Image (tube, rainbow, N blue to C red):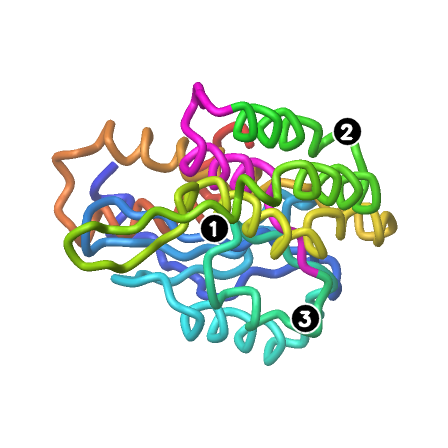
Amino acid sequence: MQRKLDQNKIKPVIRLSCKELVIVADTTFFSRKNGLAVFREPNLKKNVWWRDTVYETADLYRSGREHLENSGLIIKGVVLDGRRGIRGVFENIPTQMCHFHQKQIVKRYLTTRPKLEASRELKEIVKTLADTNEQALADKLNNWHEKWKDFLKQKTTNPETGRWSYTHKRIRSAYRSLKTNLPHLFTYQKFPELNMPNTTNSLDGFFNRLKSLLNVHRGLSPKRRKRLAIEILIGKINFRS
């Protein structure tokens, strides 16, 4: 297998039968300073661009967009995990915020089992993401905020410094995240002709299987390990996607 990896010539260009793409874009990390950014076409189940990286930045995603467009491809829609700054790279392209990641953001702020009633009610609203639309969710969030607005304004003063902060900062942050991302949570409904998914699951699942397969071959040198990863990305080494 190692000899085969060394002998194979890796073609840097992915040939596609279409010029218009929907992409799921994300970055995964194998260690603290060893990451991989990938653009994947979820309908074709093909990875169309990737790059090794140490950091996940807007410039990284911008280079991916420029590569595809300079290759004559047209990005019709993008699905992202909501990381700050990345959305601006695709500001003139319909962009879908991953529902799973939105739920995870709210979960981090509210915890798995929130004790406060306001938190529990907001968590129940988030559960309906996949079964609602933008207007309905906006109405629920507005009603929730109207009910709890005085509660959210509560402040706590530090007796030592005299400085105050909002008492329920984490609940406020969870709500602000939903309000900020609301215009991008239902893009897949606004452009049904694109067949755009509402999550990054296509790429998340690929990352999980990629890591599992690479872990089977932990004894490979870094150079061969990288070649194996590229073979998988291209699709020469196939596994169920």
Please tell me whether residue 229 belongs to the stretch shown in magenta: no
Give the residue at mark 2: 131
Three-letter amino acid code at the position of disc 1: Ile
Between 79 and 129, the one nearer to me in the picture: 129
- Magenta part of the protein: which range? 95-116
Q: Is residue 68 left or right of residue 131?
A: left
Three-letter amino acid code at the position of disc 2: Asp
Report x, y in % for residue 19.
74, 66
Mark 3, Cα crowd under 10 Å, few <14 / some 14-19 / many 20+, is some
Between tags 1 and 3, which lies in front?
A: 3
Between 189 and 21, the one nearer to me in the picture: 189
Q: Is residue 62 left or right of residue 21?
A: left
Give the residue at mark 1: 234
Between 139 and 155, the one nearer to me in the picture: 155
Three-letter amino acid code at the position of disc 3: Leu
Between tags 1 and 2, which lies in front?
A: 2
- State yes or no: discs 1 and 3 in contact (Cβ < 8 Å): no
Give the residue at mark 3: 73
